[in-house]
Amino acid sequence: MRTRAGAFWAAVVLVACHVSHSSPAMARDGTIWERDGWRVQKIASAASQGCQAIKGFASTQDASRAAAWGFISTANGRWGLAMVGPAAQRMAGQQVTITVDTQRVHVAVPRRLTGGLTMIGELPADRMGVVASGSWLTIATPSTSARFHLAGAGAALTAASRCAKGVREASTKPPAKARAASRDTSSTASPRMSTGTGFYVSSSGDILTNAHVVEGCSAIGIKGHGDAGFRAVRVRAADAKHDLALLTIIMPSSTQPAVLSWRRDTRLGEYIAIFGFPYLGRLASSGTFSRGDIAALAGLNDNEAQFQLSAPIQPGNSGGPVVDERGHVVGVVVGRLNPMAMVREKGDIPQNVNFAIKPGPALSFMEAHGIAAPSAQPDAPRLNGPDVAERLRDGTVLVMCAGGIESSSR
């Protein structure tokens, strides 16, 4: 343990050289990604390698002047948090509690490093999903605190994680003369954070989503409308063929979840609506509502288990409910036609070609695992747009995956 920690701190010392100079006048050399005030840069030394995500200013009363802060993702998948400024210096040597919104992420003892930087500490990799999807990060001692806005952190941490993966792959790539040697088959991927959507299918809090949303996750959390923070869940069952998964809340809330009713059929041309969490960190963290129609009763390559819909779908929508004008579930969002693949194959960009799983496979999957979803009422009234949106919002949850092997966007 001491050896691993030593390597991590060696990497952090190098971060200090960059972070302590992360002011508006900082040189742009080495920046590989930049957005919303976040900057991702590679770091490297003889002892350690990785990448850092830096934010230039603190939003806090304690750090009243410009203060740089940020995260490091090492090539071996570890995360750290560092900051500069008056508040950081006062915290050195004291035990601090790191909180995201209302959730405690970690307890650490900050230490001062070179260049005026204070290393807050190493962060658990399985809690980085909470950081990525949060609104405020607070570092507090009994006598002082610093509060940072996490707007854009999800995209920045994902970029840093991918950067660290690239650093590791580059460092483990064999030299040209060694190509004939046997290839190392061990994983070289760094932890990643990704998001998807799910929705309640039972009064006990079971959640349905896509299997690919939770594939390879070391930790999964869900957050619904009105929830103060994320709640831990585990995968109860998965069906890779139909891309479905059931999640169970580890510590259920006393609040009754809003469970949506189901129809067993779909009709060509009927009005539908969806709700999900696309592009988390860029779009509304409270979720996005979209409307469209059922465009075809089969999916890609005539897949009879799916249908095509015209409602816009983006990364993060996967696993969300598709409902009719009465708010009844008629499908589960699963994906969209890959535009780049179609450009290569057909020389054209597809327009809004998206897919959902039909009710039949989804209901059979749930029934096989003891869940009898409530059936739609044929005489239920038609709802206007705002009423459909509120019903979807109340029954839908953000699904956050941390750890595992990096894959395509959810």
Image: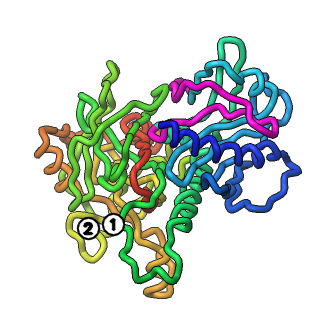
Which quadrant holds the C terminus? bottom left
Give the answer, above or below, for where 194 lies relative to 377.
below
Q: Residue at x 27, y 77 (%)?
A: 301
Q: Disc 1 marks which amino acid?
A: Gln
Give the mark nearest the N terminus, 1 or 2.
2
- The answer to which of 312 and 213 lies nearer the viewer is 213
Q: Are marks 1 and 2 in contact (CB under 8 Å)?
A: yes
Q: Quadrant of residue 272?
A: bottom left
Task: Tell me: 330 left or right of 13.
Answer: left
Task: Tell me: 100 left or right of 238.
Answer: right
Q: Which residue is mark 1?
A: 308
Which element type, helix, strand or loop, lies under badge 2? loop
Q: Position of residue 220 (x, y in %)?
A: 38, 40
Q: Residue at x 34, y 22 (%)?
A: 253
Which element type, helix, strand or loop, lies under badge 1? strand
Magenta segment: 101-126
Density class for disc 2 (Cα within 10 Å; few <14, some 14-19, many ≥20) is some
Q: How many marks?
A: 2
Q: Disc 2 marks which amino acid?
A: Leu
Residue 121 included in the magenta stretch of the image: yes
